[in-house]
Amino acid sequence: MFGIAFTVIIIGLIVSAQALFPEDPVPCKFGDGKCIAKFVNSLFSRRSGEADPSLNLRRLDPLKVHRIVIEQPSDSGVGLTLNFTDNLMYGIKDLRVVGVKGFGKNLSEPHSLKMVGKTLSLVGPYKINGKVLILPISGSGNSNITMSNTKSVVRLSGQPLEKDGETYLDVTDLKLNMKAESISFQFANLFNGDKALGDNMNAFLNENSQAIYQETRAALERAFRGLFFGLIKGVFAHRPYAKLFQEE
C-alpha cells in the first residue's frame, strides 16, 4: 500500500537534493547501489522532523497524502469503495533502503528498490461502503491503518528520451510487491456512529486482517500506482539522466 509512495519519495530526494545546487557534484556513480541506498537513508535521517530548506525539501514525517481511492469489485470476497482524503502517513523516518539494482548507464535496463519499514500508519478522514468477506460495511470519519515490519520491492522500467540535446529516462512501467508482517485497522463512526456495530466490525477486521489485506492488495497497489506513476515520470523528466550520477 505504501511502497509506491516510498519510491516517489526516494527518487524525489535524489533529484531534489541537487535542485538547489545544480553545480554541486552528485554523490553516487552510475549503478552504485550501496552508495545510492546509503545516500537516500542519510536524507531520511536528516529529514525525519522539520523541513530542510538547504535541500529545498519538505517535511517527510508525517507525509501529507491528499487523496487515495481504493475500489474493489463487488464480486470479490472484499467488495468495497474506500476513499482517504487529507491523510497523514507516519513512519517514513524509519524507512530504510536495503537494496538497489539498476540505475546504470543503460536506461533500458530494469531498476529496483528494496525497502523495509518498522511501523507505517495512514491516519485521517475516510469514507467506506461495501462488504468485507460476508459482512456489509459503511461509514465515514477518521481512520488509522497501521502496517508493521513491511518489506517491499518496487521495479521501474523505461527507455531513453532525447530532449533538447539531452537524454532523459522516460519511465514506462512500475510494479510493486509488498508484504507486511501484520496490519491493523481502526475506523471511527462506522454505521452512522452505532458503537456496538462499529466495535464489532473493527474487531472483525483485525481478526481477519491478513485475509482482508490479501483480498485488497491488488486494488491498493493499483490505486497507488495510478496516483504516483505520473509523479515518478515527472521526477525523471525534470533532469537529464546523466546529471543524476557521477561519471566513472
Image (spheres, grey):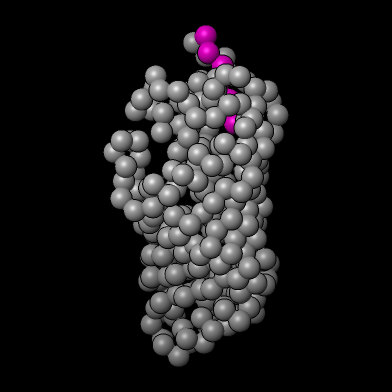
Image vertical order of residue 74 relative to residue 202, above or below: above
* Residue 51 drawn at (x, y percent): 31, 46
Question: In this orientation, does residue 95 appear?
Answer: yes
Frontmost residue, 38 versus 196? 38
Answer with left or right where residue 84 lies relative to residue 169. left
Frontmost residue, 115 versus 234? 115
User: What secondary structure is the stretch in magenta mostly built from?
Assistant: strand
* Residue 94 drawn at (x, y percent): 48, 57
Question: In this orientation, does residue 227 appear?
Answer: no
**Screen quadrant of the C terminus:** top right
Image vertical order of residue 202 relative to residue 80, above or below: below
Q: Image point 65% across, 22% down: which residue?
A: 105
Answer with left or right where residue 218 lies relative to residue 23. right
**Screen quadrant of the N terminus:** bottom right
The range drawn in magenta is: 165-172
The residue furthest right is: 109
Image vertical order of residue 227 relative to residue 167, above or below: below
Frontmost residue, 27 versus 21? 27
| Quarter of the image where one finds residue 136 | bottom right
The residue furthest top is: 165
* Residue 139 drawn at (x, y percent): 44, 74
Image vertical order of residue 1 relative to residue 24, above or below: below
Q: Image point 54% across, 84% down: which residue?
A: 203
Assess whether residue 232 is covered by the magenta stretch.
Answer: no
Frontmost residue, 237 versus 116? 116
Q: Image point 38% across, 28% down: which residue?
A: 19
* Residue 52 drawn at (x, y percent): 32, 42
Q: Image point 38% across, 70% down: which residue?
A: 142
Labels in figure, total: 0
